[in-house]
Amino acid sequence: MKLQEFENSYQKSEQKLQFYQKKSNRLSIIRFCLFILAILVLLIGYFQKKNILYIFSFLYLLLFLYVVAVHTKVKNKLFYYDSLTKVFMQHIQRINNQWDTFEEDGEEFLKDDISIDLDLFGHHSLFQLINATFTYQGKQLLAQNIIHPSLNKDMILKRQEVLNELSEHNNFILEIQTYGKMMKIRDEETIYQFIDSLSQNHYHSMKKYIFIFPLLVLITILCCSFSIALPYSYMLCVLAIVLQIIITILFYKKNSELFEPVKKFQKSLNNYQQLFLIIQNEHFQSSLLKELQAKISQNQQAVKGIEKLSRISQAISYRQNILLFILLNGLGLYDICIRYFYINWINDYGTKVQQWFDALAEMELFISLYIPKMDDFLVSQPQISDTMSLSFQNLKHPLIDTQKVVGNSFCLENHGCVITGSNMSGKTTFMRTIGMNLILSYMGSYVFGENMICSCMTILTSMRVKDNVEEGISTFYGELLRIKKMIEYSQFKKPMVCFIDEIFKGTNSLDRIAGARATIKKLSLEHCIFFMTTHDFELCNTQEIDISNYHFDEYYQDDKIFFDYLLHKGQSQTTNGQFLLKQLGII
């Protein structure tokens, strides 16, 4: 969708939001006045001995309850349009390059070397850019796909088919995002805890004969009402009530443990039901979307199951009122009844819940992968090649402002590529551009460029190498370990691509050049492509090995340095180190 479309939709949603906000405020005043009026009329009728006012008080009370019901519907509409407005705003912010303000940035997944080197997680990261998930499972699945993208060509092509179909379902996506935004509980780990609790088999339902006590209470209350078998019926009624309260107390802890997981996300169940209903009612053609839909819509189990669970969770919430708790359990073993129905629900649906939420998480993943296209970035679907290849046109860094980013074109000639150039000229950014777009390709998403052709390759990096004081590892040794990992992986003879930034910069020039040449020889393999940046021009010509040389240029104007950030063939002929040293007054 274009920016203008999102802005128009945002304005319409904002108008609806303001309309329901005003309506909600009016209804709040009306319901308050009706309640006060009902109380006043009741009091006047009592003190003035006018019984007819009781009828008016009762009518006002009924009207109050009606207004409360209407107000609840209005508040639901208000909440919906508030969430929809926020969804539109996020799309607008993403298009306007303000997406790095989004709360979810995946910082907790920033652990391995590649994630750090390629800005996959954390502030201003790939995860923060494309993330459209709203459940714990969805976030985990997206992160898992970024860390370990698929290298299966068939799976990549199936996902591309999914994204092509989603381009015809923008309203569906907006509905999913809106109900996702409406989730009451932001810590969606509670859903995971709930699903985990369903697999615990130590919960057992009560025997049916225990319900003889509520039946006994009912019979004795009727006997007391019609003065049958007094005073024995009265004594038996009191005894049955006391026994029920004792039974409730004995099982209170076990019941509370059983109810706790579902109680935590009780307010979100209606939203989950709506999400499953939206997915169930949509018409899909791609095989992956049909499989996903089948997990949810088979016999309408997800919608019906969540609806029943919502009623049970609502009943569980009444336990919070101590007076209601004592009354209901004294009269009818309320806790045991809820337990009975909840255990039955687990028996009917417990084994299916995992696949419902897995399917929802998968839908969140697909929507996240579609985000670059939906938000009108200049993207395209890559072509996956069966042979070792890499080429693209106007490929851009996904995380750089669209108004400032410079695209580059490339076509692989030799498997080894040595890149030279001045400081800040764009060498490292170029490698990150390729790395991030390859990850997007393997996830089945879009690349920020045109005509990209790539093979499925394992990505290895040596870029942001840091020392580790606790383990006694220097920067140089840390880099050695990264290079060793690449060489060891190459022995499996599986397709791989390596990105090495400023190779062995942590040691002297003699050792650096010798180590770099040895690395080039080790990685010059048919199944390996490597990109290596360096300031050592000696590496541009390595005997017995064909490598391709590329460089980035700079130019000077009015004692200022400028860069075009464009990749050029051949070895760099300029340096800017001394110029920068002079500018800063160091020499």
Image: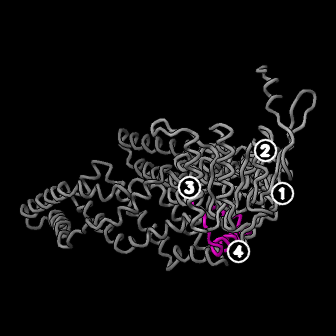
Magenta residue check for 156: yes
Circle 1: is it few (<14), some (14-19), or many (20+) Cα within 10 Å?
A: some
**What kind of residue is marked 2?**
Phe
Q: Which residue is mark 3?
A: 485
Q: Which type of secondary structure does the marked residue at label 1 adopt?
A: strand
Q: Which residue is mark 1?
A: 409
Circle 4: is it few (<14), some (14-19), or many (20+) Cα within 10 Å?
A: few
Give the x, y percent position of residue 9. 75, 54
What is the C-alpha distance between the residues marked 4 and 2? Answer: 34 Å
Residue 491 relative to residue 331: left or right: right
Asked where in the image residue 274 lies, by quadrant, the reply is bottom right
Q: Are marks 2 and 1 in contact (CB under 8 Å)?
A: no
Q: Name the magenta segment's main secondary structure.
A: helix
What is the C-alpha distance between the residues marked 1 and 3? Answer: 29 Å
Q: Nearer the viewer, mark 4 or mark 2?
A: 2
Q: Nearer the viewer, mark 4 or mark 3?
A: 3
Q: Earlier in the sequence, mark 3 or mark 2?
A: 3
The residue at 36%/65% (across/down) is 198
**What kind of residue is marked 1?**
Ser
Q: Earlier in the sequence, mark 2 or mark 1?
A: 1
Q: Which residue is mark 4?
A: 386
Give the x, y percent position of residue 209. 17, 73
What is the C-alpha distance between the residues marked 3 and 2? Answer: 25 Å
The residue at 74%/56% (across/down) is 375
Q: Which residue is mark 2?
A: 537
**What kind of residue is marked 3?**
Lys
Asked if 475 appears above or below 67 in the picture, the reply is above
Magenta residues span: 147-175
What is the C-alpha distance between the residues marked 4 and 3? Answer: 25 Å
Give the x, y percent position of residue 469. 48, 35
